[in-house]
Image: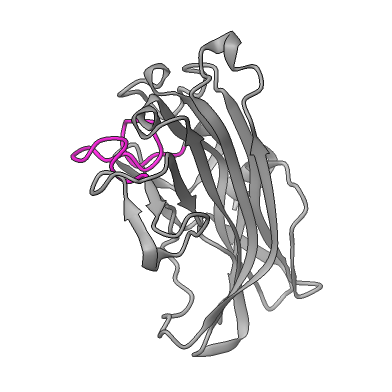
Amino acid sequence: MLFPVLSYAHFNGKGHVHDISKTVRTFFNPDCDTNGTCDLKRVSLIYKAYEVWFADDPDYPSYGNGIVIEYETDSVSSLEKFAVVQFIRGGAFYSSKNANGTIDKIIGTVTENFEETVQFFFPEWVIDSRDSDPAYNSDPDDGRFYYLRWNKVLGSYDNRTRQYYGAEKPNAPVVYLTDYPSGAFVGGMGAVSAAMEFKTCIYKASDVPVKTVRSDVYFAKPIICFEWQNIYIYDFDSGKFKTEQVDIPLLYKELSKE
């Protein structure tokens, strides 16, 4: 998970989350014989755009996109044969409008990546991992599979019925992971914008190195990748967030000049 240093509003439990749209993409592994992965039956990406309304600031919601990546195998014992790895390009930045009408932009946020606190804007693709194991949600102490999730209610992703794979094995061979990266919002001093592109992929676990560096994005050939974005860039002229695709390397050069 990625969090900006700048915070918007303290959620006091009286706000709400409003889903704007939802898309489901599913891969059924039709050519599994060619790469020996026929125990992987299905991979699905559930992609949502949402608003978060805080009760203590009802005029300005936070905007963001998030995903659930879920996979199903032929047996519970086969779940650990596969690993999810996510890649990210871009990040978050802060902008404000001066009295003379010019716009100042700074990156101004940090994130944890490969056991380092780094500037939260990657101009080129890197592995999205907090530790040196590329597997998504891996943990140096608990390993790469412990925090896989499953739900007591099949087909649900409700945290109230969620279980961790490492604490208790599921009855059905279906597990998932989630990512809700930092969103975009307007504050009293300006706006925080998100300009992030992601590739969420699944590999044979044996093809994913136990330890590498963030720039090692071609370590193996994935079984399938899903591309998605979290882009909300505030436009001061219209007073709205733009969600169109952007040139991330070019945007980074613009931010670096500020």
Q: Is residue 72 magenta?
A: no
Question: Seen in the image, is 21 located left or right of residue 71?
Answer: right
Q: Nearer the viewer, residue 216 or 68?
A: 68
Is residue 46 positioned above or below 73 on the image? below
Q: Is residue 204 visible?
A: yes
The percent coordinates of residue 125 (x first, y second) are: 56, 32
Image quarter for residue 146? Answer: top left
Q: Residue 138, position in %: x, y?
A: 32, 39
As drawn, the residue found furthest toward the top would be 34
Residue 116 drawn at (x, y percent)? 31, 41
Majority secondary structure in the magenta region: loop
**From the viewer's perspective, is residue 237 above or below residue 28?**
below
Q: Is residue 144 magenta?
A: yes
Q: Residue at x 43, y 27 (%)?
A: 82
Q: Is residue 74 left or right of residue 29?
A: left
149 or 112: nearer the eye? 149
Residue 233 as seen in the image, left or right of residue 113: right
User: What span is colored magenta in the figure?
Assistant: 128-148
